[in-house]
Image (cartoon, rainbow, N blue to C red):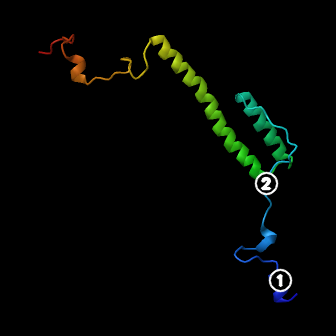
Amino acid sequence: MTQRTARMDVEPGRPGGMTRSRPAAVLPADTPDHSLRDTRDVSALLGDSINRLRRGELDPRVANAIGYLAGILLRALEQGPMEERLAHLEAVLGKSAAESQLFEFHTKEEATDGQTSTAPNEN
C-alpha cells in the first residue's frame, strides 16, 4: 500500500479520519415512550435502562444521558409538592412567608429591651 492510498481514508482536520468517527447514539424509532409523571415512573425507566445497558442493548452514552436527565426530573418532581405545601401553609396563615413575623429576626439587644432579667444576682 502506498502512502497516497493510506492517506485517502483520513479526513483533513480530524484525527483518525472517518474510520474513527462514531454514529450518533440514539434509540430505535420504535422505542416506546415511558410515562414520567412520578418518582415510580422515573425509577422504572432507570431500571429498564440499566437492564438494557447490561445486556448490551443500550449505548452507554444514551444510558448516561438518561441517568443525567432522570436526576434533574427527580429533583423537579420533589420540588412541586414542596411548593404546594408551602402555598397551603401560607394560605392557612393568611399571609405570605415574607410578611409573616414567624421568621423575623432580632438582635440580642432588641430581644431584651424592656424585659427584666430573671437570672439571679451574682454578688
- The total number of labels drawn is 2
List the residue tagged with mark 2.
Answer: 25
In this view, the residue in front, 78 or 30, is 30
Q: Secondary structure at mark 2?
A: loop
Three-letter amino acid code at disc 2? Ala
| Crowding at mark 2 (Cα within 10 Å: few <14, some 14-19, many 20+) | few
Most extreme residue toward the left is 123
- Tell me the CA gap for discs 2 and 1: 28 Å
Q: Quick check: 16 above or below 81?
A: below
Q: Residue at x 79, y 35 (%)?
A: 34
Residue 80 image offset from top left, x and y in percent? 60, 27
Residue 6: mark: 1
Q: Residue at x 78, y 77 (%)?
A: 10
Q: Is residue 79 left or right of residue 116?
A: right
Q: Residue at x 22, y 17 (%)?
A: 112
Of the numbered discs 2 and 1, the one sitting upstream in the chain is 1
Residue 107 picture quarter? top left
Corner quadrant of residue 12: bottom right
Contact check, label 2 and label 1, Cβ < 8 Å: no
Q: Position of residue 26 (x, y in %)?
A: 80, 51
Image quarter of the C terminus:
top left
Q: Residue at x 79, y 42 (%)?
A: 50
Rendered-image quadrant of the N terminus:
bottom right
